[in-house]
Amino acid sequence: MSAVEVRALPGRGRGLVTTRQVEAGEAVLVEEPLLLTVSQEAKDNACAHCLCWLERCTGAVRCQACHQAAFCSPQCQQQAAAKPWVHADATCRAYAQLPLLLPGDAEGQASLRFLIQAAGLKHSSGAANSSSAASSCSVGGHEQLSGYAALMALVGEPSPAVMAQAAVLQPALCQALGDASCSVLSVQEAASLLAKEAANSFGLLAPLGQQGSGDGTAAGGDAGARVLRGGALYPTCALLNHECLPNVARFDALDAAVDGRWPAQWPGQPAAHGSSSSSAGHASSTAVVMRALHALPPGSEVTLSYFPLHWELRERQAQAQQVYGFTCGCPRCQLEASPEWQQQADDDEDDGSGWETDDGGEDSEAAAGDAADAAGSSSDHDMEESEHQQQLQLQQLRAAIRAAAVTAAAAAAAASGTPLQPPEPLDASYLSLFMLKYVCPVQGCFGTMAALRGSNACECSVCGALRSEAEFLAGLEQQG
């Protein structure tokens, strides 16, 4: 029985809702990509078919025809050539035109590469309705489209800026494909595709600590940084609505087919190296797995955070509006926008409390020094010092109360084996607990910790770190 079904949700459009009890750590969704596109910056270093980093692969080959794609192995190259939307002959010839049609325009070339692949998917879906590229699947009893129909069913409406971009790219697409009649995609259709890709694509990055020596700098990043290798469209996962306190985390496994470092409890047996396809129950290295952070009762909406959990309110709101076109009004955003939260945040910044790892000690010392220098007399200074001590004691007492409440709640939840339920409305203690429990404690990671099914441990979606419930509670006591 499928764990989720598609439902129309008031004020939220379509979404995914659990059909049964979901265990903590259960893979709620496992999906292979409908369309995967290597980034223009990583095209010389990542496989165009599975995005494996080439320096990790002993049999890597480069396309000598288009010089715009490389592959981790001859097997991956052969599989790509069999898919018109990846690297068939016509697609390869179109890729060769990218630097000629849009010289020096990396962003334009990336968008044109995506349109070339979308045109290949359209051709494949129309030519063979019985093929896997045009088949349909079922999610919770609801028939789901696939192939080009699934691509066009994604949400996303073109803005005037995207329409202008499509007006430039559509003639270039026709020229790249040798389509003199410009019938492959209309300007409106190209604009719609670009909008849908922007709204629904999942960025695929190297797992933290698993990139090769060149993976941190080849695409313009700092050494050791997670580099965007490409983007992929997962139509069912695209139905997941955003929540700043989500109940699932996304796990992926780039390079796992090469180095064997699959996330714990990856569905099915790992696919062989050189293959991004998967048989029934076997997820490939380009699949995404949405794992439940904690147990979910039937009828729960399944939600994913579109942003790292540690982002502040201002960052989240700006990203939601600029990239996805909505304003988030979730309970966390409402709490953090309240005057009480803002005051508490100011107090925490002053005394160094809170869940953040940065203590701001130097700033606090500098501020204290400035205040002392500004004191006009010894009596004024003594009064200010006394008031400061009283304020500090109140802040420390508030922090101690919060820490005690968080520790008690966590201990109760651990003892009962059930997830802590958010109160209505959301309060600061629950938010503090959530952040401490589900933000990876590894310095500089900020991944999401999700439960392992049948275990009291959690695994980070980014760095793969494991932490037991006992270790979590011990960490709380140390912070308290």
Image: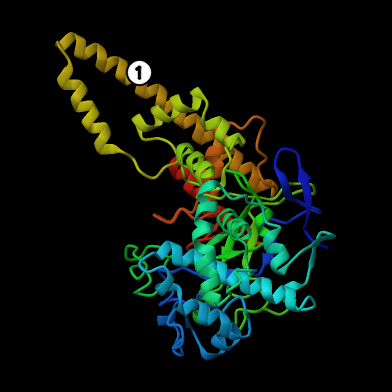
On screen, 362 above or below 66? above
Residue 401: x percent and y percent? 50, 29
On screen, 397 above or below 90? above
Front position in the image: 164 or 442: 164
**Circle 1 sits in a helix, a strand or a loop, which is it?**
helix
Kind of residue at badge 1 = Gln
Q: Disc count in the image? A: 1
Q: How is the image coloured?
A: rainbow
The residue that appears at 52% across and 58% down in the rendered structure is: 167
Residue 166: x percent and y percent? 53, 58
Say if residue 383 shows up in the picture.
yes
Residue 152: x percent and y percent? 68, 60
Q: Residue furthest front?
A: 181
The residue that appears at 47% across and 46% down in the rendered structure is: 310
Quadrant of the image occupied by residue 41: bottom left
- Asked if residue 385 lies left or right of residue 37, the reply is left
- Asked if residue 90 lies left or right of residue 351, the reply is right
The residue that appears at 56% across and 60% down in the rendered structure is: 202
On screen, 476 above or below 23? above
Quadrant of the image occupied by residue 373: top left
The residue that appears at 30% across and 19% down in the rendered structure is: 388
Dot 1 crowding, Cα within 10 Å, few <14, some 14–19, many 20+: few
Say if residue 281 shows up in the picture.
no
On screen, 46 above or below 459? below
Residue 262: x percent and y percent? 56, 73
Front position in the image: 423 or 175: 175
Q: Write down the residue under mark 1.
A: 390
